[in-house]
Image (cartoon, grey):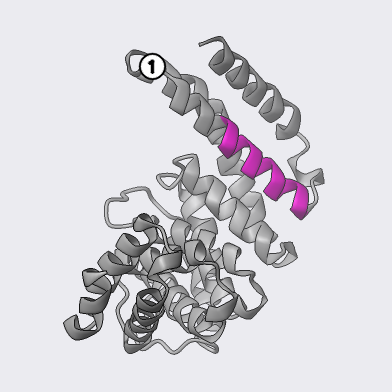
Amino acid sequence: GCQGGHTKLLCQAITAAAEYRILDFQPQELSMLAWSLAKLQGRVQKNSRKGFAKRQRSKSRGTNCFLACLAEVACRRLSEFTPQGISNIAWALTTAGMLGEEEARRFLTAAALGAACQLADFPPQAISNLCWAVSRMSWANNHASTSTENIASMAVMLAVSRMCVSNNHASTSTENIASMAVSAFFEAAAREAMHRIDNFEWKDLSSVLVAIGHSRHRSSTTQSLATQVVFRATDSCHKLTTQVMLNVALSATRLSVQHDVLRPLVIQ
């Protein structure tokens, strides 16, 4: 409707004004800009009628190109961002449907590798949002080319991450590097969530578990986290929404929590 048209015009005006000055933005400003554009674009997509889907994709292309550029800049300046800033950009790129773009995947890979060593500095909500974004990064169906320079730079980041997170599968292929990044990140996220479980709101804790459950990463750490969350959820059923309980139960099943542990929660 009219509101959707105004929102699209606003997105176009913002990207046009920011495009040629993107290198002048501070890290916090970049994260706020990405977050705002994703929110605005999400509203446009939500309000658009199905019959105008093709026209809608065409009109959002300019915003997507800008977000790809922003992801590239943010990736180069990753060390300058706060944990919340990294989480905001990861959330924004995923929400805006940017995971088909190489720049967005490269940012998420770098963010996952970097965060794996630094999750103690991340607030629970930032961990939850980053888990959600990383869980949706799919490489299996990606046929976009990646330059040797990009592969090499990610391989360097992977080598650094191995100092913090053990990994026995060395490879410099793009898909394997991404897979290692995801595994390293989720292993670290599971450990951090267990260590600070009392600091997590149920919404964030269940979101972390859902993200890990949807990933391919499985370990004794992720199973231990799921088991611990199930025990706590069983004792707190009267405080939890049906959706949170369902998320915990389904994710715990995916993470191979023993049936005897799950049964009391299911009965509730």
User: Residue at horizontal 75%, vertical 27%?
Assistant: 17
Instruction: Using a 10 Å C-alpha cutoff, classify the residue at mark 1 as few (fewer than 14 neighbours), some (14 to 19) or many (20 or more).
Output: few
Is 227 or 190 nearer to us in this picture? 227
162 over 174 or under it: above or below: below
Residue 38 is covered by the magenta coloring:
yes
Q: Is residue 50 left or right of residue 10?
A: left
Numbered-mark total: 1
In the rendered view, tell whether residue 120 sits above or below residue 11. Answer: below
Residue at screen point 32% across, 13% down: 51
Give the residues in magenta: 27-40
Secondary structure under the numbered disc 1 in the rendered image: loop
Q: Nearer the viewer, residue 82 or 247?
A: 247
x, y percentage for residue 13? 70, 22
Residue depicted at x 51% and y 64%: 204
Q: Position of residue 70 (x, y in %)?
A: 63, 45
Residue 78 visible (yes or no): no
From the image, which quarter does the C terminus lie in? bottom left
Q: Residue furthest top?
A: 2
* Coordinates of residue 240 in the picture (x, y in percent): 42, 63
- Between 108 and 259, the residue placed more toward the observer is 259
| Residue to which mark 1 is pinned | 49
Residue 202 position (above or below residue 107): below
Residue 248 seen: yes
Dividing the picture into quadrants, the one containing residue 77 is bottom right
Q: Which corner quadrant of the image does residue 11 belong to?
A: top right
Q: Within the magenta stretch, is there residue 170?
A: no
Is 94 positioned to the left or the right of 138 in the image?
Answer: right
Q: Amino acid at mark 1?
A: Arg
Residue 263 x %, y %: 20, 77
Please name the predominant secondary structure of the magenta segment in the image: helix
